[in-house]
Amino acid sequence: MKKMIKKTFFLNLLLISAVQMLNAQITGTWKTIDDENGQAKSYVDLYLANNVLYGKVSKLLQKPSDAICEKCPDERKNQPVLGMIIVVNMNQKDGFYQGGSILDPEKGKWYNCKMWLKDGDPNTLVVRGYYGPMYRTQYWYRVN
């Protein structure tokens, strides 16, 4: 009985450690790359709040720092892109962050989103936005 309790304890500890490692790996600053022209666009800071992933634009690489979101819906319309939260409500499930949304400020569209670290490369984040049955995939790179 003691061996079973010990095994269960260590198994739970290992599982908790693995989840924390995944969270720690995906948080931080990422350089976004435009999937249409291959150019670096911005830096996005991914962070956890109550175990939910969010992302905020922390630097613009192609536009002036005072650029506004002319096409954005809701309260983001005509607001500065710098500092804007563009990734919302992403939850970790089955090895992915999913269930939330990502905003493309240039197009002013929200997409359902799924994110994961590229296999074998913890410094590359695969970001896939879905709009109905269609999707776009971008690769973001960790900023050290």
Image (tube, rainbow, N blue to C red):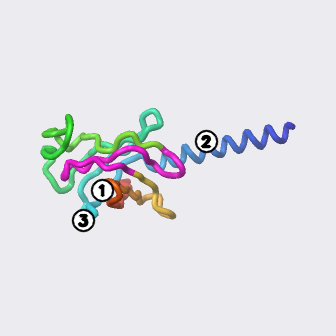
- Secondary structure beneath dot 2 equals helix
Q: Characterize the local packing of mark 3: few (<14), some (14-19) or many (20 or more) Cα atoms within 10 angstroms.
A: few
For the residues marked 3 and 2, what is the alpha-carbon distance in whole angstroms? 38 Å
The residue that label 1 is drawn on is: 32
Picture residue at 41% right of the left edge, 52% below the top: 114
Q: Which stretch is magenta?
A: 92-113
The residue that label 3 is drawn on is: 36
Tell whether label 1 touches label 3 (CB within 8 Å).
no
For the residues marked 1 and 2, what is the alpha-carbon distance in whole angstroms? 29 Å
**Outermost residue to the right:** 1
* Quarter assignment of residue 12: top right
Picture residue at 39% right of the left edge, 47% below the top: 28
Q: Quadrant of the C terminus?
A: bottom left
* Quarter assignment of residue 15: top right
Type of amino acid under label 1: Thr
Q: Position of residue 93 (x, y in %)?
A: 51, 46
On residue 16, the disc is 2
**Outermost residue to the front:** 133
Q: Is residue 42 left or right of residue 127?
A: left
Q: Nearer the viewer, residue 65 or 52?
A: 52
Mark earlier in primary sequence (3, 2): 2
Type of amino acid under label 2: Ile
Type of amino acid under label 3: Glu
Q: Position of residue 125 (x, y in %)?
A: 41, 57
On screen, residue 46 above or below 31: above
Q: Position of residue 59 (x, y in %)?
A: 24, 48
The chief SS type of the magenta part is: strand
**Magenta highlight on residue 101:** yes
Picture residue at 37% right of the left edge, 56% below the top: 127
On residue 56, the disc is none
